[in-house]
Each structure stands twice: as C-alpha cells, then as structure tokens.
C-alpha cells in the first residue's frame, strides 16, 4: 500500500473520530485542567466559599460583589512563590487576577478567602 493511501485512511479515521468526539462532548462541561494553576483553581471553585471579616466588610460596602469575586477565578493565576503549599490542614494560595488579588486558604471542605487586595 502506498504512503498516500495510508495517509488518506489515517486522515479519514481521524476525522470520523473527531466528529464522534464533538458529538459526544458537545454541551457537556468538560475541561482540561492539567496545569497546576488550573487544578488548584478548579479545586477552590468546587468548595463552599467562606469570607474573612475584612472581605465581608468589602462585600457589605459594595466595593466588590460575590459574582465578581467568583469571576476572578475564571481568568486568575496562582503565584506559587507567594503561596504556602506545604501547610496542613489548609494550604494558602495567592491568586492573582486582573484587578484583584486574593489570599485563599484551601481546606478540605471549604475555601476561606482571607484577604482581598484591590490593584
């Protein structure tokens, strides 16, 4: 069999596989969280949030609302240099957003937002 025919069969099977994947995965909330930033942010988002007194005061004084606070995690990065990933039972992460930075304590069942820094 010529190399051109092999390549044609390969591309035909590959394209059929892509169509099946698009059909089965369409409409589902699938994500590819392989990087350390993405895994930590996804882990924090799945937990019940708890706010410190200073953050609660900022929420009450309408400096920021909870919707904006949750949207920070969508496009944020974790600064592992400023984070304390070795502490137990809760690890502390420094989350850097576009307009806000957060210090989040990630425990087993809750994510405690300790500090909100407005840039």
Image (cartoon, helix red, strand yellow):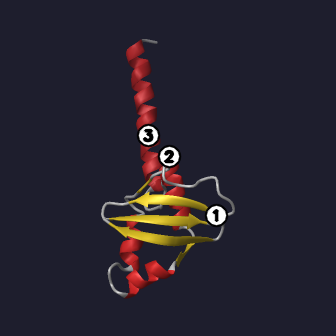
Q: Position of residue 81 (x, y in %)?
A: 49, 48
Is residue 60 visible in the rendered image? The answer is yes
Q: Is residue 119 left or right of residue 47?
A: left
**1 or 2: tag closer to the N-terminus:** 2
3 or 1: mark nearer the eye:
1
1 or 2: mark nearer the eye:
1
Q: CA distance from mark 3 to mark 2?
A: 29 Å
Q: Residue at x 41, y 37 (%)?
A: 15
Residue extending farthest to the right is: 89
Q: Residue at x 47, y 47 (%)?
A: 20
Q: Position of residue 92 (x, y in %)?
A: 56, 61
Q: Dot 3, how many residues are within 10 Å of its Cα: few (below 14), some (14-19), or many (20+)?
A: few
- Which of the labelled discs sits on residue 16, or is there none? 3
- 109 shown above or below 30: below
Which residue occupies the foreground of this view, 3 or 69? 69
Residue extending farthest to the top is: 2
- Which of the labelled discs sits on residue 58, or is there none? none
| C-beta proximity under 8 Å, tags 3 and 2 | no
Secondary-structure class at tag 3: helix
Q: Where, by quadrant of the figure, is residue 87 drawn?
A: bottom right
Q: Residue at x 46, y 70 (%)?
A: 115
3 or 2: mark nearer the eye:
2
Q: Residue at x 41, y 14 (%)?
A: 3
Residue of label 2: 35
Q: CA distance from mark 3 to mark 1?
A: 46 Å
- Image quarter (top left, top right, bottom left or bottom right) of the C terminus: bottom left
Q: Dot 2, how many residues are within 10 Å of its Cα: few (below 14), some (14-19), or many (20+)?
A: few
Secondary-structure class at tag 2: loop
Secondary-structure class at tag 1: loop
Residue of label 1: 90
């Amino acid at each position: 069999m010529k190399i051109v025919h092999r390549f044609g069969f390969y591309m035909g099977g590959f394209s059929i596989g892509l169509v099946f994947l698009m059909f089965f995965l369409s409409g589902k909330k699938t994500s590819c969280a392989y990087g350390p930033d993405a895994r930590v942010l996804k882990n924090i988002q799945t937990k019940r949030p708890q706010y410190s007194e200073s953050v609660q005061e900022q929420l009450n004084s309408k400096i920021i609302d909870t919707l904006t606070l949750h949207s920070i995690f969508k496009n944020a990065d974790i600064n592992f240099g400023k984070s304390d990933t070795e502490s137990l039972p809760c690890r502390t992460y420094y989350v850097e957003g576009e307009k806000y930075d957060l210090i989040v304590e990630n425990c087993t069942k809750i994510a405690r937002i300790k500090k909100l820094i407005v840039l």
